[in-house]
Image (spheres, coloured by chain):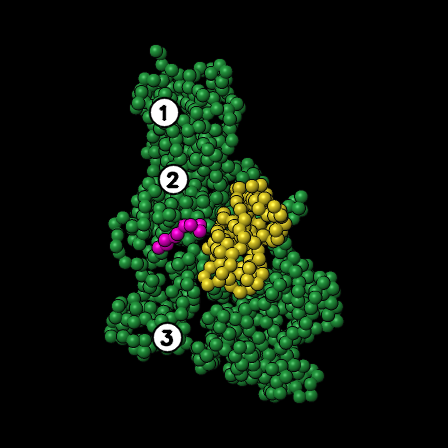
Amino acid sequence: MSWIDIGHIEDIPLRGARIVKTAVGCVAVFRTAEAEVYAASNTCPHKGGPLSEGIVHGQKVTCPLHNWVFDLNTGLAQGADEGQITTYPVRLDGARILLDGDAVKTRSAA
Amino acid sequence: MSKQKLIVIGAGMATGRALEHLFDAAPDAYDVTLFNAEPRGNYNRIMLSPVLSGEKTYAEIVIHDADWYETNGVTCRFGERIASVDRDRKVVIAENGDELPYDKLVFGTGSNPFIIPLPGHDLDGVIAYRDLEDTNTMIESSAIPGARAVVIGGGLLGLEAAAGLRMRGMDVTVIHLMGHLMDRQLDEPAGYLLRKALVDRGIDVRCSTNSKEILGENGKVRALLLDDGTEIPCELLVMAVGIRPNVKLAQDSGLAVGRGIHVDDQMITSDADILAVGECVEHNGAVFGLVAPLYDQAKVVAKTLLGEVDAFQPKEVSTKLKVTGCDLFSAGDFAEGADREDIVYRDPARGVYKRLVLQDDKLIGAVMYGDTADGNWFFGLIKDGTDVAEMRETLIFGPAYQGGTASDPLSAVAALPDDAEICGCNGVCKSQIVNAIKDGAGTLADIKAVTKASASCGTCTGLVEQVMAVTLGDSFQMPAAQPVCGCTDLTHEDVRLLIKSQELKSQPAVWQELGWKTPNGCHVCRPAINYYLLADWPLEYTDDLQSRFVNERNHANIQKDGTYSVMPRMWGGITNPSELRAIADAAEKYNVPTVKVTGGMRIDLLGVKKEDLPGIWYDLNQAGMVSGHAYSKGLRTVKTCVGTDHCRFGTQDSTGLGIQLEKKLWGSWTPHKVKLGVSGCPRNCAEATCKDIGIICVDSGYQIGVGGAAGMDVKETERLADVATEEEAIEWVTAFMQLYRENGKYLDRAYKWVAKVGLDWVKETLADDATRTALNTRFEISQSVYRKDPWADHAEKRADKYQPLADLTLEAAE
């Protein structure tokens, strides 16, 4: 793992999200509680809705386009919908948000 | 063999306990010399809060008095610091130059309070809360009549300081950076209850608040200046934002130091003859602030000094706040997780909140507020890793209550006081309904007949039924009502009434007092509750962007490809060449792919990227245009015809009235979108008769219709009133808007709401001049907050939030 400092916890509103541009596409970084963050693909597998714009509740996010709900721990769609978003390692070091740089690098052909 | 020499630096609780163990096990092993920078021996620092509040005296919290030190042969050098340690010669050098040799040395240098380096932090009257001196300073300050205090830090220590100062009669304000109090030990619901208890005792608590500067006068603190420009006057400012291990001497002596003094499991530092214990140590990356692990360390220190083998193992810790009357307890790990389950118990009537966190059939965390009697039992289960699968069903009720029934979902209603108003239309309070039931009223119809409760608009029907259920018990069959969502059993109507009657003014207040089943709602209830709170408490409640659907959060309509549409307001459909030019310039500058004229008489720019929103808004603002709210559950457009200005049939200035209405109503939030139309004659070119509110101008004045629709349902408006003047028309329309805002269910268009409550009720209500005036007044109070251009506000203050947090594409490509 190579932790990259992507910002301060207060840069993300409580129960909100911001995106980080990476080689694997836009990654949404969610702040689910005062000091709790998750990172996952910003793109809903249903119709490509931007998940960072969804309403964040508990440790879940609801896609703004058609209300699919994803658990941010597993990336799995909840309820009757079937699908999964990629999640990425992210952690807090004090107030700084660290994202695993290795996980968001372009995946090699090997 | 002669006695070995032991020197201890610091007479705190950890070293004190270590010495007790040492003397118990081998009273003659060491000659002990004890240095302490404070001019006194070991006292119970944890109990400083009761000393501050006046509930205890210093004498009562002394652990080791002069007698104890003498009995155990300790040479006390209190009020003296150690200047340096010469590890090669194994001597410590005291401040006065004395050199004392040691065989073993123990560091117990404790911690220093962290002082935020705000400008003015060195002013007189700015103190930390750490020792008896600080406590005495606070007690002296509180003795000055009218003295005010500010406490920075809403953690354990800060709140104990605040409560103590308040008990001594000071005006106290607590400033806390995070969103809820004691955010390290408590979750949000418990933090909410704690805040409520402190506010009830007259402490001003401000969360999510950042300090900017401490203002002084003649070298003394005068006020605290916040980020938002607010000044809070104070004569005493207590900083209680945390502690840092005091490692200076250890570092100067060349010991390995990180955040604290590095120690191994035997509490030995990087020098085999030097040990460390207490708040100054760092063990496996962790530092310690609570007393339980420090006492565990002390035990190991004593063993190590006696050459016996023992190892320090950090254990789960629990926290209790020592503020009389605020019962809270937290232990273990209570973050949520995929593999973790929550058991939540809320009893709004008693202000009780309990949450247990389970993982693999074991209890790993507990947060409790209001009733902490079972705290230690739960703490025991956490520490022992007990398998709780067998008692899971009844676990939360504690050890004394196994096999009981579930909590009462009606407790929120049961908790209402007798004089709580249930039916606002007819002024019926709970006790009247209860008395009617006791006198024999057994059905909703009986209650209506006897008390008139729910006999008018009917919004309180659900609540009346719940009062019946609570009073009659099993003999009452509750009709099935549609709850807001899975987070609660209450209906929209019930929630709304309870928000008003219980004066709930924040989302955590709603979640707690109404017994929400989830920690912070879901995408269904959050926007609804946010709307109810901002509509009912416009001045007290702050609109929560994170509880809004994306369009209302970003003040633009999201499109299927994730871009947005931007639509500036055109008052009454009137525009001019310079506005059109600005729209054209913006469309070109931001490469807007589609420019469309809408049905609401304005121009839509479709396909704008999120990052460009603040820029395009700024450009449109510069041309005098504001948000058209084409995305909101609020006022959309006021469609007009040209009226008497140009039309040969026009009877009144319909365009002018439309513009006046739009300028009055814009920016207001409503249960669902609201569209208006004003037609200048009955030919109705503005299609006003299928709007939420539509006005038809006639020779004699204005016909006001409401409840039209032209969407999934098509519906013609029904006549609300005929009035003679423009002023009256505006007054009636505004009153109708406010009545809808105050009573409508979230996501019910006006026509649905009117159908529920009945047009007759709406007419009767608005026919009363005083009621109409009051509704207009309340609308204007709300508009003092919301009649503002959100585009200008976001472009100025939140533009950065529209950009990515970071761009790693360059680094990742390498």
Q: Is residue A77 above or below residue B579?
A: above
Residue B539: % across, % down: 51, 61
**Does the magenta portion include A84?**
no
Residue B489 percent location from the top left of the image? 38, 65
Q: Residue at x 37, y 17 (%)?
A: B31
Mark 1 — residue? B309
Give the residue at mark 2: B316
10 Å neighbourhood of mark 2: few (<14), some, or many (≥20)? some
View extreme (front): residue = A110
Residues at discs 2 and 3 both on one chain: yes
> Which chain wears green?
B
Reply above or below: B770 against B411.
below
The magenta region covers B337-345
> What element does badge 2 sit on?
loop
Secondary element at image label 1: loop
State which tag comes first along the sequence, 2 or 1.
Answer: 1
Q: Is residue B425 above or below residue B724?
A: above
Q: Which residue is most to the top?
A: B1
| Shade of chain A as shown in the rendered figure | yellow
The residue indicated by pointer 3 is: B454
The x, y position of residue B244, in whole percent, is: 49, 34
Name the secondary structure under disc 3.
loop
Of the residues shown, which amino acid type is indicated by label 1? Val
